[in-house]
Image: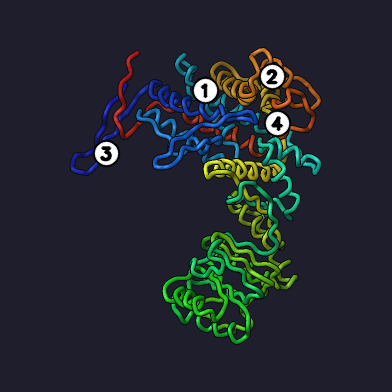
Amino acid sequence: MAGTVTSDTTLPTTPRHVTFGTGGLARIAEGIAILARAVRLTYGPRGRNVLLERPFDAPVAAGNAERICRGFAFDDPLKDLGARLLQEVLLRTKRATGDGGTVATILFDAMLQGGVRRLAGGADPRALARGLETAAAAALRHLEMRSRPVRPTQLRGLARSIAGEATLAPLITQALEAAPSAAAVIVEPSRRLTSEVVVEAGFRLPRGLASPAMASDTLQLRTRLARPFILIAAYPLSAATDVVPVLHHVCSRGGSLLIVAEGIEGPALATLVANKVQRKVEAAAVCAPGHGGERRQIMEDLAAATGGTVVKRDAASDLSSSLGRAEAAVVSKASTVIEGPCGDAARIRGRLFQIEAAMQRFTSEAERESLERRGANLLGRTAVIRIGGASDPAIGEMLHKAENATQAIKAALRGGVLPGGGGAYIEAAADIARRLTLYEDERAGADLVLTALAVPCQQLLGNAGLDEVAGRSVLSRYAAPRGGKIFDVETGAWRANAILDSALVLRSALHVAASTAALLLTAAVVVTSAPVQETMH
């Protein structure tokens, strides 16, 4: 049953359309099912792509849940609400671990579709949600207890399992082995036909030239500074007097100049460009990365690494002691690498100690990643995975896969690993099915989780082309003791300790899917701004 509600006519308001009963929830679930069906076909090493039309651009083949669902919309407002809910599930999963969106989609869809059928049969929504949440919590505890740290010998197998691409796994493994820590591995696009791993020694800033006019190599838009003096300014440079003194100082000393500041604009930027044209001092300027307190900490790290100090607007400073030094600096369109920074080792160790202390009390995954990147910069070595390809769509798709795989492997190195191929979920379902003592509708809610935990493995086997009989055989063996062996869908063989998944990714996907499904199943009314068309039954 649907109706329209409006507020006081004296105020400009948007009419709200209200749908009561389970009919609105069923339409929402229908929209989620349509979108989830497309996402499910991409799952696993034998998954296929989804061809996406793009306005005013070439179509792109996507194998990533986030890319498939981004911007997706239905004409039906209730189905569209389902699409946006699924997008929120993907966003929350990505925020937690950087990957796991496809698994979260499969679990969420399975729980929701089963829950809608139970509600249509007269189940109590609150009891159903309680049972679902109880079973999900028990499964999460099981996964946490069963996770194990990654052994060095498992690194290649882990990369192969998570990347799902034969070409990506060796690149990620090479980068992890070359970097001082997992945080020092980053992914970038490349204009080459092939992908490669490049190890950059030095302090890396993810910001490039403030103006293309500063590039000495106009073809690649980059410049290389030999033995540069480094000015680190904790304020925007806007006046010519902000840069003229340091240019004169560097000119008298003989050398080049790199400026890292909160901003470079107006006459200050014009002065630096004019200096480049006149070739008085080889100079380049870069805006400092980050925001607020994080930006200030990065500047302090750079000052420690180069032996300089962070210059403040109102503080008197001696340029001879404030400027940092390095062997070289390579500044491109999008990044800056300061090679051989001439900092004091004791000062660098002090900054590393502060970062390690902050790691013990970080409050979000973004903060933790920022701290890890800062530590990798001070250690002075970054492994860059440069993704190449024959076309921009091909590079873009492989870039997304590489980024997701790298994030998932980093999460595995932090939180441990579990058997892959969906085996960990099936083990969890078999374990909690024996121990849960729920009744009636709460038991029905728990069954939604137990059933959903088998769906990722079923989808993996289905995408690999296994028939129903072979699929049931694999599932039954997963639920029984099997010596840690996992079915390899690419070879059709059972392999021990070779196919692994990130424990954090699996737990995050299950937690987000279960909590969102439980919340949605208790919705008795749906309110939309667009009118809902009545359906005939």
Q: Circle 3 is placed at which residue position?
A: 14
Q: Circle 2 is placed at which residue position?
A: 475
Whether residue 467 is visible: yes
Q: Amino acid at mark 2?
A: Leu
Which of 197/429 is in front? Answer: 197
Residue 421 relative to residue 38: left or right: right
Evaluate if marks 1 and 2 touch, with contact meaning CB atoms under 8 Å apart: no
Query: Mark 1 vs mark 2: which is more N-terminal?
Result: 1
Q: Amino acid at mark 4?
A: Gly
Which of 309/42 is in front? Answer: 42
Element marked by disc 4 = loop
Dot 4 surroundings within 10 Å: few (below 14), some, or many (20 or more)? Answer: many
Q: Circle 1 is placed at which residue position?
A: 127
Which of 226/341 is in front? Answer: 226
Q: Circle 4 is placed at which residue position?
A: 420
The mark closer to the camera, 1 or 3, is 3
Element marked by disc 2 = helix
User: Whole-Å distance between the Cαs marked 4 and 1?
Assistant: 32 Å
Dot 2 surroundings within 10 Å: few (below 14), some, or many (20 or more)? Answer: some
Whether residue 521 is visible: no
Q: Residue at 81%, 41% (x, y): give it.
A: 153
Query: Mark 2 vs mark 4: which is more N-terminal?
Result: 4
Q: Residue at 63%, 38% (x, y): give it.
A: 505
